[in-house]
Structures are given as structure tokens and as C-alpha cells.
Image (tube, helix red, strand yellow):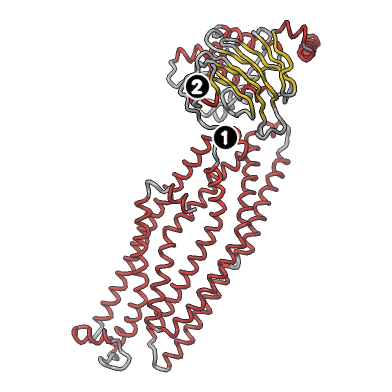
């Protein structure tokens, strides 16, 4: 925890250092004020009323000497007003130092939280797909928000209270013993009792806070899923069901919070009981000493103030321990995300992707990466530079898994994948992925204009290049029909364009990258057959410049490919042209005949 706080406070250390320095001055002034108040009551008050006798038994020798050497203070209210003025100035200065400490700790805390969020986000950006699969999206969001907020609160409290509480405890105890050691011993008995109780509370509440944060993840996941799929929810009139599901998640969080609070609720009453009992004991003992003439009323007032400061210091330590218990759960979750090492490590070969030739050599792949439940089994395949290759197969046969191994979204379990004769594990990831464009099954557009989204492919592309890519992807016509054309704002996730339009924009974005290898993963499924044919025709013009891999459910989308790969349960069942497969492969024949029958039935 301390390591994370030290690492991510860089750039704001000046505020982190200033805060405890300012707190030291604040505490010094606050601790001196009760002693000064005792002198105001016991010395200045008596002087003002003519009851102070220099040299009398029980007097403070320092005050006798001071009043003897400064007779102007020995009569009247001059000493009373002077000490009262000094007390007021000290209170104001304590207020100023406290305010400045509040300002610096806020700056330090905000900087720490900002650095921590950036560090978390940077770590997440480095994750491989396998790492992302390990954490839920909602869990990562909670880590970047709620957990960081908890860590920030602990960091701010540490900067102030870790200095303030021990310093005040030591100094207030010193002055309390200096005033009256017999009464001050009461405080030393109470402190370990209260500290032990708070330690017990911390031990019991930690696992409950940990569970509560896990349930926060689940609740956030429910919210995210509902907002992403809100159109489906409304289309199926499932609002009541979703409301019930969210209510259950919210109730689970509430019950987990209450489970922790059932223990935490005892903190304040027990602390107040201890404080009131201590004050009562001090008043009882001190009152007896005042009656016996062993103590002045001003000293008793100061002792009560010091006892409050001492107990409040103990309480502050205890409360920060409780906050640290909560933040320990949060920081542990943050640390899990920060310490997560990407399963994909960067290679050291600075080579750029050149011709786009791809070779799969005895490749086995499993998402669990332990050899169990293989998704792909013994894949041997060569795709020559400039070829257009189609891949077809049933759901779950490993089509997407196969092509995701090329840009190293995942690593193989065994075997090797080569691009241009170099193992993909040896490439620098940036160089490899710069040479591969992939249009995924799930088409994602971002908030901003159409032009801004297309420039993801090439931020330096000219407008002519953007329009040319859009034309090949059959997107230019519908984009031009919008009032603002390429400056049309897409909204979050491209909500104001259809599924087919979104697919075409994603293809145009991929083309702008000018890759050596282009992978279309079922990326024309929402496009009509005529538009699909035009897109394929446009891609043919680029065949000399890049290798194209097309995953499709429709045979019409791949029948003109140089060769077609038929996958069945993670294995290559056959490789050939449309005519060869139609003649020799049973799976391909069944798919073709079923689709032709569907066309005939629709006609």
C-alpha cells in the first residue's frame, strides 16, 4: 500500500511534504492553547481580581519571577488581556496552518488519484485479450473509480493524521503529566483499551468490505450490460425484468454494507463512552484535589482539554485504521490490476511486415492456455502473399480464433505462426499490428465524427484517401447523404447509423491503414448481397498489394476467393477452390445446398 502511494505521488511530493510540516505547526499551537488557558484562569484571573500573591505557596516560580520583573503586569487586567490576545492569535494561526494543510493535502490527494488512474489505465492498455478476459469490464471500471477514490481518501488522511495524531498524543500527554501526573495516569490506562477495541473492529470488518467491493463489481456490470443493450431491453419489453435484476444487485451491496456497519456502528458509541468516562474520572479526581487545595481550577480545565486531545488522537488513529481497512481491500484490487502482466510480450525484431505471407505450423490453441479443451487443433496452413482466402465453418469451429493469432491478440498453446517467414512472437507488436488490419465481428465506432473515426486507420490521411477508402467499402454514398457528410457526429458507439453502415465504415477505416494483411471477420453479415459483391470487387483491385482473409457465413461472399478453408470443430477439414470443395467436401456441399435452397424458397 505504501509502495503504491509513494510511486504514484510523484509530481506532487512538494504538497505531500508541506502537509505534515503545516500540520506540525497546527498541532504545536493547539497543544499550547490549553496550558495558556490555564494561566489565564489561574494567574491572569487572580491578578485581575487582586488574589495573586507573589511568593505564595503553590505558585509557579516562573510567573512569580515574570511579575516581579514586569510590575506593569502585576496589577489590573493588563496580563489578562495580553494572554487572551496571545491565545486568540495562536488560535487564528492554528486555523491558518490547518487551512493551508487542507489545501496542500487536497492538491496532493488529487494528484495521487490522477496518477493512479493513469497508471491503471496504462496497465489496462497493455493487457492482452487473455488478460482482459480475466477481469470483468465492470470490475476494471470499479477499480479505476470507487477503488481509486478509497485509496485517495486514505492517502489524504495518512498525510495529515499520521503526523497529527501521534504528535498530538505525545505532546498532549507530556503537558498533561506536566500539569498533574496523578490524573494523567488515567489517560494511559484508557488509551490501550480504546486502541485494542478499534484493532478488533478493523480485523472483523476487512473481509466484509472486500466482499462489498466484489458486489459493487457485479452491480456495475448489471448497469453496463443494461445500458449497452437498452434497445434490446425495450424491444423485448424487459424493463421490469432488468429492474428486478438491478434491484437484487443493489440489495446485495446494501446487505454487504450493513454487515460491515453492524460492526462499525459500535465504534462511535464506545468511543464516546470512553471519552465521557475519562472526563468524569478526571473531573472527579481533579475536583477532590481542588477542594484539598492541591490544584487550581484552570489546571483542571486544561487537563480536560488535554484528555480530549489525547482521546481524539487515539480515535483519529483508529478511524484511519478503519479507512485503511476499506482502502486495503481497494488497493489490493488496484494492485491486482497493476501487477497483472500481459501474456503477450513484445518481440525484439524491428522488422516491418512486408509481403503478407502467413504460415501456421502445427498450431494448437486454447483460451485457457493449458492444453485443455483446445479451440484449434494441429493447424497447418500456408497463405501466400496477395492471396484472397475465405474461411467457412460452423459456430464455435474456431474461425475467429484462427485469425486472431496472426496479429497476436492471443498466443498459440503450441506450434508457431509465421508472417513473412518470421515468427509473430519475434515481431515488435506495433510493427506486426501496423501491418495487419482487422475488422472484428463486433464493429466498434467511437464518439466523434465519421472522419475522426476513419482517421483511426491513418490519422495523417488526406481527404481524398478517406473518400477513396469509403468508396471501396461502399460507404461514401450514404455518408454523403448526411447533411454534414464526413463531419456527421456518430454519437456514442455509432448509434445513429445502421448495422450495415457501421460495418462499411469499419472496413473503410481498416483500408485506410494500408495493411499488408487484411482480415474481415464476418464483417459484411449485415450488408445486402449486392453491396457485399461491390465491396469484394473493390477489394480485388488491392489484391496485388495485400493478403485478404475473409470469414463469412455466406458462400457467395467467398466463392471467388483463391482458396477456401473449411473448419470443423477446430480442425481444418478441407482446403480448396469453390469448385473443388463443391465437388469433394461434404461439409461445404451441405452449407452450399442449404443456402441455395433458402434462395430458391425466398424466390
Q: Can you say whether 415 is above or below 179 in the image? A: above
- Left or right: 191, with 537 as reference point: left
Q: Are marks 2 and 1 in contact (CB under 8 Å)?
A: no
Q: Horizontal and vertical percent for residue 264? A: 60, 64
Q: Horizontal and vertical percent for residue 468? A: 50, 11
Give the mark nearer the N terminus: 2 vs 1. 1
Q: Quadrant of the C terminus?
A: top right
Callout 2: helix, strand or loop?
A: helix
Q: Can you say whether 8 is above or below 550 in the image? A: below
Q: Quadrant of residue 290?
A: bottom left
Q: How many marks?
A: 2
Q: Which mark is residue 332?
A: none
What residue sits right under mark 1 in the picture? 343
Residue 185 visible to an observer of this rendering: yes
Neighbor class of circle 2 (other Cα within 10 Å; few <14, some 14-19, many 20+) is some
- Left or right: 270, with 11 as reference point: right
Neighbor class of circle 1 (other Cα within 10 Å; few <14, some 14-19, many 20+) is some
Frontmost of labels 2 and 1 is 1
The residue located at (38%, 73%) in the rendering is: 171
The residue located at (59%, 36%) in the rendering is: 132
Q: Quadrant of residue 34?
A: bottom left
- Depth check, front residue: 395 or 219: 395
The residue located at (48%, 21%) in the rendering is: 455
Q: Horizontal and vertical percent for residue 209? A: 61, 55
Q: CA distance from mark 2 to mark 1?
A: 20 Å
Residue 485 visible to an observer of this rendering: no
Q: Horizontal and vertical percent for residue 449? A: 50, 24
What residue sits right under mark 2 in the picture? 434
Q: Can you say whether 8 is above or below 570 in the image? A: below
Q: Can you say whether 20 is above or below 553 in the image? A: below
Callout 1: helix, strand or loop?
A: loop
Amino acid at each position: 500500500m505504501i509502495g503504491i502511494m509513494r510511486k504514484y505521488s510523484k509530481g506532487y511530493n512538494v504538497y505531500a511534504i508541506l502537509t505534515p510540516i503545516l500540520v506540525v505547526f497546527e498541532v504545536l499551537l493547539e497543544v499550547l492553547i490549553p496550558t495558556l488557558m490555564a494561566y489565564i484562569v489561574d494567574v491572569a484571573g487572580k491578578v485581575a481580581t487582586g488574589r495573586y500573591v507573589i511568593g505564595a505557596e503553590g505558585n509557579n516560580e516562573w510567573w512569580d519571577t515574570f511579575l516581579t520583573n514586569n510590575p506593569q503586569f502585576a496589577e489590573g487586567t493588563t496580563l489578562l488581556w495580553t494572554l487572551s490576545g496571545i491565545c486568540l492569535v495562536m488560535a487564528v494561526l492554528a486555523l491558518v496552518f490547518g487551512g493551508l494543510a487542507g489545501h496542500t493535502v487536497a492538491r496532493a490527494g488529487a494528484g495521487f488519484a490522477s496518477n493512479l488512474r493513469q497508471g491503471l489505465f496504462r496497465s489496462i492498455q497493455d493487457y492482452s485479450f487473455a488478460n482482459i478476459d480475466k477481469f470483468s469490464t465492470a470490475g476494471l471500471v470499479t477499480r479505476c473509480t470507487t477503488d481509486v477514490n478509497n485509496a485517495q481518501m486514505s492517502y489524504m488522511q495518512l498525510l495529515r493524521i499520521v503526523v497529527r495524531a501521534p504528535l498530538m498524543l505525545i505532546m498532549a500527554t507530556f503537558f498533561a503529566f506536566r500539569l498533574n501526573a496523578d490524573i494523567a495516569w488515567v489517560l494511559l490506562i484508557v488509551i490501550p483499551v480504546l486502541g485494542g477495541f478499534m484493532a478488533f473492529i478493523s480485523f472483523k470488518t476487512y473481509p466484509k468490505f472486500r466482499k462489498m467491493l466484489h458486489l459493487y463489481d457485479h452491480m456495475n456490470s448489471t448497469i453496463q450490460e443494461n445500458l449497452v443493450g437498452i434497445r434490446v431491453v425495450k424491444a423485448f419489453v424487459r424493463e421490469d425484468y432488468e429492474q428486478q435484476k438491478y434491484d437484487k444487485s443493489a440489495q446485495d451491496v446494501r446487505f454487504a454494507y450493513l454487515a460491515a456497519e453492524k460492526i462499525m456502528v459500535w465504534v462511535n458509541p464506545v468511543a464516546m463512552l470512553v471519552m465521557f468516562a475519562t472526563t468524569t474520572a478526571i473531573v472527579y479526581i481533579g475536583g477532590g484535589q481542588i477542594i484539598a487545595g492541591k490544584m487550581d481550577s484552570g489546571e483542571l480545565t486544561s487537563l480536560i482539554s488535554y484528555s480530549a486531545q489525547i482521546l481524539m488522537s487515539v480515535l483519529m488513529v483508529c478511524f484511519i485504521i478503519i479507512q485503511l481497512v476499506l482502502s486495503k481491500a481497494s488497493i489490493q484490487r488496484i494492485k491486482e490490476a497493476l501487477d497483472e502482466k500481459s501474456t503477450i510480450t513484445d518481440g525484439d525484431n524491428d522488422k516491418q511486415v512486408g509481403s503478407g505471407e502467413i504460415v501456421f505450423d502445427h498450431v494448437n490453441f486454447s483460451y485457457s492456455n493449458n492444453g485443455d479443451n483446445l479451440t484449434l487443433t494441429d493447424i497447418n496452413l500456408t497463405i501466400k502473399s496477395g492471396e484472397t482466402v475465405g474461411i467457412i465453418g460452423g459456430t464455435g469451429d474456431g474461425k475467429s480464433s484462427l485469425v486472431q493469432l496472426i496479429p497476436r491478440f492471443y498466443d498459440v498453446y503450441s506450434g508457431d505462426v509465421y508472417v513473412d517467414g518470421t515468427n509473430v512472437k519475434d515481431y515488435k507488436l506495433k510493427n506486426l499490428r501496423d501491418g495487419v488490419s482487422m475488422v472484428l465481428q463486433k464493429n466498434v465506432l467511437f464518439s466523434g465524427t465519421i472522419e475522426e473515426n476513419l482517421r483511426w486507420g491513418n490519422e495523417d490521411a488526406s481527404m481524398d484517401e478517406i473518400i477513396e477508402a469509403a468508396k471501396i467499402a461502399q460507404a461514401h454514398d450514404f455518408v454523403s447523404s448526411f447533411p454534414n457528410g464526413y463531419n456527421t457526429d456518430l454519437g456514442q458507439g455509432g448509434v445513429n447509423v445502421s448495422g450495415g453502415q457501421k460495418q462499411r465504415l469499419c472496413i473503410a477505416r481498416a483500408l485506410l491503414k494500408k495493411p499488408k494483411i487484411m482480415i474481415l471477420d464476418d464483417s459484411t453479415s449485415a450488408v445486402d448481397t449486392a453491396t457485399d459483391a461491390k465491396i469484394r470487387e473493390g477489394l480485388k483491385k488491392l489484391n496485388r498489394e495485400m493478403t485478404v482473409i475473409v470469414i463469412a457465413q455466406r458462400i457467395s461472399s467467398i466463392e471467388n476467393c483463391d482458396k477456401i478453408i473449411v473448419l470443423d470443430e477446430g480442425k481444418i477439414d478441407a482446403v480448396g477452390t469453390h469448385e473443388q470443395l463443391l465437388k469433394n467436401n461434404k461439409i461445404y456441399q451441405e452449407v452450399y445446398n442449404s443456402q441455395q435452397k433458402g434462395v430458391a424458397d425466398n424466390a
